[in-house]
Image (tube, rainbow, N blue to C red):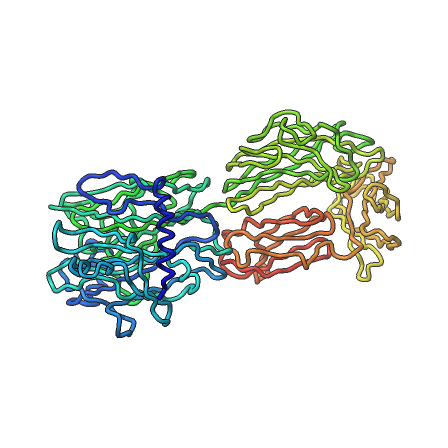
Amino acid sequence: MLTKFTTRAMSLFVALACLATTTNAQQTGIGNPYAVNAYQQVYSGVFKGGTAVIGNTNMTSGVDGVAAMNNINGGDNRGVGYTIYGNDNQAMDFVDIDGVAITQNSSSANLSLPAGSNTIKFARLYWGGRIERSAVVSKPDTLRKVKIRFGNGAYNNVTAPAANVDQYGLQATGGDWAYQTWTDVTAFVQGSGAGTYTVADVPASQTTNGTGGRYAGWSIVIAYENPNSLLNSVRVYHGFYQIASTNNDPKNISVTLNGLNVPNNSLASTDAVMSVMGWEGDGHLGATGNNPQGDYIKVNNVVVSNATNLATNFWNGSITKNGAYVTTKNPNYANQMGIDIDEVNVGTGFGIQPNATSVTVTFGTEQDQYFPSYFAFALRVKDPLVTIDKTVADASGNNLIESNEILTYTLTGTNVGPGVAKGVFVVDSLPTNVTYIPNSMEVISGTGMTIGAQTDAVDAADKSFKAVNGTRNYVKFFIGTNSTNAAGGTLQVGQGYNVRFKVQGQAIPGSVTNTATSYAFSEINELFTDVSTAVISPSGGPLSVKLVSFTGVLNNNKTATLLNWITESELNNKAFEVQRSEDAVHFTTRTTVGGNGTTGTRHSYSYTDALNTNAKVVYYRLKVIDNDGKVSYSNVVAVKLDGSAFSVEKMSVYPNPFVSDVKVFINSKQQVTANFRVVGLDGRQISTRKVAIETGDNIVVMSDLQNLPKGTYILEISSGDEKYIKKIIKN
């Protein structure tokens, strides 16, 4: 006995009864549709995962048999989804596929879940049918009982609370009941996982030929979390309505489902999945010449249809997913004659707008009767990407740093989306060879920011401050709507910031490399970062020599640095002085290499510098000397002498397998520029980018992989002569 089902379901129902005061649906309509149980939201969550629905019929045609149950085009030119067969004029018998003598009826369906770890957040079992009143009167708890099993295991007896039964009398006195019953099976599905579920002894009455309208079946609606899936906002609604037509006159009802909370991003077609279940839909009843609209469902007044569910006969007894019949069930009928379970994409064309809090669903019929049940929505929540671009301007305007010169750094960025960014802030950790100018922070523009001059203190005057971490000064700006002086706010797609501050160089200027980082969090608090680096050196301006490259790497036994540089052209070039430093500020000359005067021919140069130092890092630059005595300087190259800058033990790639984004966690011993490259197994380069890696922990997001075909790829991360390779799998 699964007595825990009853306990969990009762607890859930009490919670939902409280929730219903704010999430009950609103309804309007014409004719006589009836809300047995008005729609209310019974589950909501935002996580990586989605929804799944399974189910089956527990009845079959007793006269026409499998031929009737599998007929999906009756030959009357109304198309796939119509049939000449229905349960109105059929002797409907029980299906019993389990081979267990004690069960009267049974059917199964297979649950598929994504690869990897799945956490079942919500699972509710529904069963229903049409039953003679006398069967219920004689045993009042009849509708509350059913059996369920996983695989070939033993059946578990389930008894739902009395409050979990929705029923509708099809006649004022006597006659049949149409009903549905539900209970929570979250723990059962979590413990069982993907596979075959069988439900038996669904309460219902069989019929003889001509009685008509009998049906029985079941369904499970599931919300699951999977770290390899896309981020979705999931909502589940429960209800039970009678939609019926008398005398072939049209009837409809519109229901507003509140609490939808559409994410603040645009939706593609597959970004919004609607799952719906209904009872007693008939494939042979739909549009006719006198009833052109047929049996339909509208979302925000737009008719829903696909290849298997026509606009004029959506409720046709099918179990489908995006226009294809679901076949992983036993018995595998195309026409269930009494139960519809359909998943459809509604991301585009149905008026579901960013930030919408509700959706309106309209049910209509012109000659049928059916009973809509649950709805489930999975709405894609997209990741933010707050960019940062950093520039530096020197006071003299000649693009070089001179003695004690003031430098102005400007940081600009935008949430290029496609998702909303939360908790947004930027940090600029200043290099040690500059001095911060007090109270020089300024906000030029920015969503939710205090415009104008900023104080250095953490105070109520603005939302930025200057502080010290160890020996490094840094500045921090909190950005976005509802930001404070201690926390970042929200940036919608397209919103951004523009801030600046000043530093002063040293008396003996050296090359200044300064990196800033933007931080933003997604709906589920995943961190996304972007980095930008600005470099200014004592030469700053154009070289008389056009350098193609300048590199330095350790030799194999790490006793010398191998320096190589290539020139594209040279103008009046006398020589190159190879200079070395241990602090990137004070340089000494190691050797002089003759130049080639004036030439438009490419030339290659090299020098091997013996390492007679205990420093962990050495820096090299080229001093270019012209024949007329003018000098200029190349960029500075850092060479690490204490092993790898990356800590491979603290490097991880996740999620893997992935769907759209790959994140790389790197712990680095120093500031380096790393090359990130994704290649196919055939060696074809897919993606490449350069990333400035800061000292300490870094998270790098590879956010341009969503369009890759499924398969295996190689992620290569390199810096200098160091390389890290990881196999990644796209699902």
**Residue 480 figure quarter:** top right
Residue 351 visible in the displayed image: no
**Residue 367: image location, x then y, percent:** 16, 48
- Residue located 66% across and 58% down the image: 724
551 vs 656, left or right, is right
Residue 712 in view here: yes
User: Is 35 on the left or on the right of 412, as rendered?
Assistant: left
The location of residue 674, given as percent across then percent down, is 68, 51
Q: Closer to the camera, 255 or 426?
A: 255
Q: Residue at x 70, y 53 (%)?
A: 719
User: Which of these two is toward me, 155 or 520?
Assistant: 155
Q: How many marks?
A: 0
Residue 82: image x %, image y %? 21, 55
Q: Which image quarter holds the N terminus?
A: bottom left
The residue closer to the viewer here, 633 or 165, is 165
Q: Residue at x 55, y 47 (%)?
A: 526
Q: Is residue 290 above or below residue 447?
A: below
